[in-house]
Amino acid sequence: MNPAIRRLLIAGGVIVSLSMGIRHGFGFFMPPLTAAFGWTREAFALALGLQNLVWGASQPFAGALADRYGPGRVLLGGTLLYVAGLLMMTVSASPGLFSLSAGVLIGLALSGTTYSVIFGVLGRCVPAHLRSRAMAIAAAAGSFGQFAMVPIERGLIDGLGWIPALLILSVAALLMLPASRLLVQHDQHASGADRHGLLLNMWRTFRGAWQEKGFRLLMAGYFVCGFQVVFIGVHLPAYLRDHGLGGGVASMALALIGLFNIFGTMLFGELGSRWSKPYLLAGIYLSRSVIIALFLWAPLSPVSVGVFAAAIGFLWLSTVPLTNGIIASQFGVAHLGMLSGAVFFSHQVGSFAGVWLGGAIYDATGNYNLVWALAITLGIAATLVNLPIRETASKALALQGS
């Protein structure tokens, strides 16, 4: 890769690392907030579920705006919303306010600072033969953010308290601004033409893509991805605590997920440039179900948690470069941000279901057994729906710029 592409990847990596890394530690805020305000776990989980839903619903619009006008304003708005959401969380003493801050504001912020916007830039600026690798590097940056930020967030909460921790994280989020400026300098290919009728163009683009069976199946599989990873990411610390394992084990688990996610995402990004991406996705979903089943079957201990975290982390975001690579192969890159966002919306509906059902079913039954079973069953279903997908160019939608 030439130096310009390397700088582009560094800038995108910093943005995704901070944006994804900060949110991955939100599960550690569950015990102090629920204890401080007397909330149920469902109330906390509902806010984070709403975050994922808002993130997904707004992502196609953020992607479309970045495709049309360039990523600069989208990244700026996303960063400022992220800071505002973190600051507002410090004064959110009711479930409603917490849903507004951690749910709505940060959900909107994530749509402007994560994959669809960054991948749109990479799709336009990186040659086709390097796209899968570049997207894998960007996704791996999100994994590194999780690996780095999770222990930092837990240390801040334990050492200073949850309010100072949120204040420090809001300052850290501001570091996305200089990285955004560097990213924008490299993206000179966003279309400035036809700036009217944005919603109409979005609808026509999505309608054309929806005619493709493979696109619909891709959305179905991504729903499962969201369900699994967000349920585990948010509720695993509480699950381990319920079984007598301390916060150190949970912190270790989430950090290992982030660390091994880097290796898994990079590997599958490379494999996706050589082998069938749909078959690789099917293998990932099947492997997740097997790993979850083995984790529940084995005696729970710090060692088993570490092995589970490493294994599931290896498969955590490995779906991201493969899924977006399939979209680029089918529909080109001119509207990659918007279509990536549309598929991601399905992911976030699954995320909402996973995080909210985790809290609701726990409050109703006193355990997470049913949600674990759902995660396994849905993984098998996702395996089956990915197998028929093909990477051929769309016949229903001819998009320019591939």
Image (tube, rainbow, N blue to C red):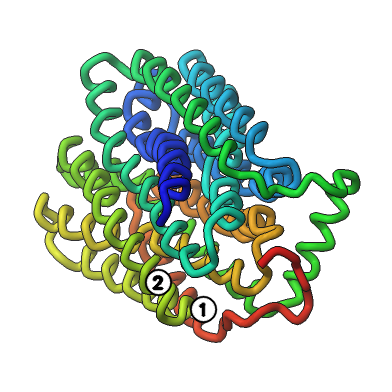
Three-letter residue code for mark 1: Asn
- Mark 2–mark 1 distance (CA, rounded to whole Å): 9 Å
Q: Within 10 angstroms of label 1, few (less than 14), some, or many (20 or more) residues?
A: many
Which quadrant of the structure image shows residue 218? bottom right
Position of the N terminus, as image quadrant, is: bottom left
Does 322 sit left or right of 121 as displayed? left
- Does residue 348 show up? no
Mark number, residue 386: 1
On the image, numbered disc 2 is attached to which residue? 285
Q: Within 10 angstroms of label 2, few (less than 14), some, or many (20 or more) residues?
A: many
Mark number, residue 200: none
Q: Earlier in the sequence, mark 2 or mark 1?
A: 2
Q: Is residue 294 above or below residue 122?
A: below
Element assignment for label 2: helix
Instruction: Identify the residue shown where x is 42% and y is 19%.
Output: 37
Q: How many circles with numbers are drawn on the protein?
A: 2
Q: Nearer the viewer, residue 98 or 358?
A: 98
C-beta proximity under 8 Å, tags 2 and 1: yes
Instruction: Identify the residue shown where x is 79% and y is 70%.
Output: 208
Expressed as whole percent of the image width and height from the top left, the position of residue 69 reads 74, 41
